[in-house]
Amino acid sequence: MTNVPFLLLIEDDDAIRTALELSLTRQGHRVATAASGEDGLQMLREQRPDLIVLDVMLPGIDGFEVCRRIRRTDQLPIILLTARSDDIDVVVGLESGADDYVVKPVQGRVLDARIRAVLRRGEREANDSASFGNLVIDRSAMTVTKNGQDLQLTPTELRLLLELSRRPGQALSRQQLLRLVWEHDYLGDSRLVDACVQRLRAKVEDVPSSPTLIRTVRGVGYRLDAPQ
Amino acid sequence: MTNVPFLLLIEDDDAIRTALELSLTRQGHRVATAASGEDGLQMLREQRPDLIVLDVMLPGIDGFEVCRRIRRTDQLPIILLTARSDDIDVVVGLESGADDYVVKPVQGRVLDARIRAVLRRGEREANDSASFGNLVIDRSAMTVTKNGQDLQLTPTELRLLLELSRRPGQALSRQQLLRLVWEHDYLGDSRLVDACVQRLRAKVEDVPSSPTLIRTVRGVGYRLDAPQ
DNA sequence: GCCCCCTGTGACAGCCCTGTGACAGTCGAC
DNA sequence: GTCGACTGTCACAGGGCTGTCACAGGGGGC
C-alpha cells in the first residue's frame, strides 16, 4: 500500500454502492466496486486491493461465504457491512474471518476511520521498524543494522536508541532519558547518560566524534535526527 | 499465544468490570483488571498482556488519552469500550490508535468475537510447515526434522519451538515465553526458560554453543531466526 | 506398582555490561 | 580573549545476565 489505500467495495444495492464509493473516494481512497460476490472474487484476483468492504446481504453467495472463500487463499483485511444488527451476526461474521463488522447505515467518516484502523493494524505488524540515515531499527526483532550489517548493541544502548527513535527530532533531557531508559528518578551529577550516548555513538555513527544522528542539544540533552 | 490470550481490562465501574471479567474468563481468556488509567498503564508495564480492553469514561486520564499514551511506546492491540455511541467518538477513538471500538452494552460473545478477530491478525496460520535453515517444522504432524532426520523433542521443547516459529524474527521476552509455553504469569528469578532453550538448542543447533537459529537477545529473551 | 524420562530448581562460573569519577576538551557569554 | 559551565572520553571494578549442569520429584507408560 503506497499512500492511497485501494479498496474493493462489494455491495449489490446500486444506491448504497454509489453513495459509499463517492464518500470513500472523497476521504482519499481509491475504490473499485463489484455488485455481487462472484464479481467481487473475480476482481480480487485481478486487482489485488489492499482491503475489502463487503456487504453481507448479497444475491447468490452471501457475504459470510465470500469472506470464508477469500480467507482460504488470502489474508487481506475484510470489513463486513450489514443492515442487520443482531449480535449473532456479528459473531458469525467475525468468525468467518472478517476483521471488522460495521452496521448500516454508516457515516462515511466512521467507515473511513474503521478502514484506517484496520489498515494501520496491518502496517504495524508488517513493519515495526524505523530508519535513520543508513541505520535501521527493527523493534520487533530488537535488532539494529547499519548499511545492512547487524550492530551488536548492549541492552542499555538498545533501550536508549529505542527511546530516542520513538521521538525523532525531539530533544530529550537527561532527566527524561534517565526515566525512560533507566527508570530512575534522580540524576545527580553523573555522566551516566553521556557515557551511554558515547558508547552508542561509537557503534552507530560513521564518525563518532562528529555525530550526525544522535545530536547534542547543549544545556538540554540529546536528539535523534534523521538526515534531511 | 497458543490457547489462552491474556487480556488487560481497564474499567472503573465495579459492576461492569466484574461482569466482563467473568464473561471473558468463561470464554477462555485470562484476564487482569485495572480500575483506572494510571493503574492500567502500570499493569501494562508489569504484565505485558496480549491485548487491552479499555473503557473510555475513566476518572482522571480518559480512555482516549490512555490509548494515545500506550501507542507512544507499544503496539499491542487495543479495543475501546464505551457507552456513548456518537459517531464522532468512534472516529476520535480509532484515530487515537485503537484497533476496534465497541459500544456498551455489549454481549460477552460479541466482545469475545471482536477480541479474537483483532488477535487473529497477529497470528500465523497454524497448519502448514515452516523451515528454518536445515530445520523443518511440520505443525500438523507435530514433528521436527533436521536435515531430513526426525528429532525427538519433548513436549515442552516442542511447544517452545512452535511458539518461537510462529513469530519468526521476533524477539520474545522470557515473560512472554513463560506465558505462551508454560501458561504461568510470574517468572521469579528462575532459569526455567533458559534451561529449556538450552535443551532445545542441544537438539536443534548444529553447534549448540554458538547458536544460529535460536538467538539470545540480551536483556530481553530469545528469537528464532531464519538464516537469510 | 515400577521404572524411566521429563522437567523445574538452585548453584555456580564466566563474560561482558555498566556506573563512576577524574580529567580533558569545547562552547558560549561577557 | 577569558572564564565558567557543560560535554566528551576513558579506565576500572563491581555486578548483572546468561549458559551450564546435576539432581530430585513427579508423571506417564507398561
Image (cartoon, coloured by chain):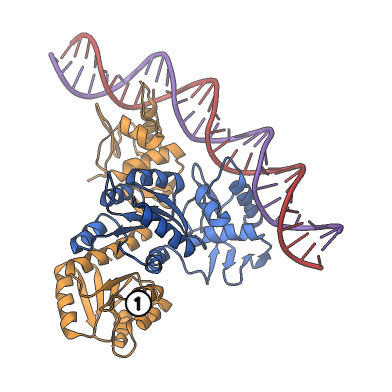
Chain colours: A orange, B blue, C purple, D red
Q: Is residue A59 above or below residue B3?
A: below
Number of labels in the image equals: 1
Image quadrant in which you'd find residue A4: bottom left
Q: Is residue A154 visible?
A: no
Q: Percent x, y for residue B127?
A: 52, 72
Q: Label 1 is placed on what type of residue? A: Asp
**Which chain is mark 1 on?**
A
Left or right relative to B122: residue B192: right
The one of A208 and B210 positioned closer to us in this rendering: B210
The one of B189 and A206 positioned closer to us in this rendering: B189
Dot 1, how many residues are within 10 Å of its Cα: few (below 14), some (14-19), or many (20+)? some
Q: Is residue A87 visible?
A: yes
Q: Is residue B16 above or below residue B41?
A: below
The one of D20 and B87 positioned closer to us in this rendering: B87
Image quadrant in which you'd find residue A53: bottom left
Residue at 50%, 60% (x, y): give it: B4
Q: Is residue D6 above or below residue A178?
A: above
Q: Is residue A81 above or below residue B44?
A: below
Left or right relative to B216: residue B104: left
Residue at 21%, 61% (x, y): give it: B91
Residue underneath mark 1: A89
Image quadrant in which you'd find residue A191: top left
Q: Percent x, y for residue B137?
A: 58, 66
Left or right relative to A11: residue B142: right
Q: Percent x, y for residue B219?
A: 49, 41
Q: Percent x, y for residue C18?
A: 46, 31
Residue at 16%, 67% (x, y): give it: A27
Q: Residue furthest bottom?
A: A60
